[in-house]
Amino acid sequence: MSQFEKLKTFEPLPSSVTVKESSIHGLGLFAKEKIPSQTELGITHIKDDRFSHGYIRTPLGGFFNHSEKPNCEAIYDGDYIKLITINIVNFDEELTVDYTKHDWIKENNE
């Protein structure tokens, strides 16, 4: 696959997720279909020291909200942070992460 073909396949959000109004805060990520546990949804942040807290957010990283009972986890993977479901996420359920496990997220949202 050429570099151009790879660029054409980029999607800001996985096809199983959408952004809409959240009862938690502002806008949030919501499942458009049932998403199995341990599904990698994509990259939320990319390491870049030129940005606040050392990361730049992708569209996926800009919309997940906090929950004390999250259904997703932000996993550090080298220069990336990825969003992975930790249990089944049902249709129309908001995807959430526990912010208290990530100082760079807490500081950015306080």
Image (cartoon, rainbow, N blue to C red):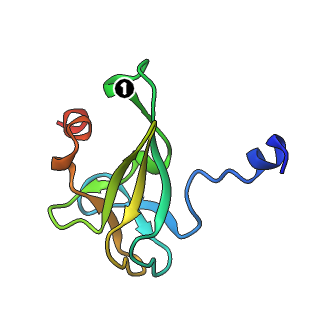
Task: Look at 21% across and 49% down and name the residue there.
Answer: 99
Is 12 placed left or right of 84 in the picture?
A: right
Q: How many marks can you see?
A: 1
Which residue matches tag 1? 54
Asked if 68 appears above or below 81 in the picture, the reply is: below
Asked if 10 appears above or below 45 in the picture, the reply is: below
Task: Look at 20% across and 60% down and name the residue there.
Answer: 67
Q: Where is residue 50 in the image (x, y as percent from the top left)?
A: 43, 18
Is 47 placed left or right of 6 in the picture?
A: left
Q: Nearer the viewer, residue 11 or 41?
A: 41
Q: Nearer the viewer, residue 88 or 67?
A: 88
Q: Where is residue 39 in the image (x, y as percent from the top left)?
A: 46, 69
Say what secondary structure mark 1 lies in.
Answer: helix
Asked if 56 appears above or below 89 in the picture, the reply is: above
Q: In which quarter of the image is the C terminus?
A: top left
Is 44 placed left or right of 52 in the picture?
A: right
- Residue at the front extreme of this rendering: 78
Q: What residue type is labelled 1?
A: Gly
Asked if 63 appears above or below 14 in the picture, the reply is: above
Task: Look at 25% across and 35% down and name the residue there.
Answer: 104
Task: Look at 85% across and 45% down and name the residue there.
Answer: 2
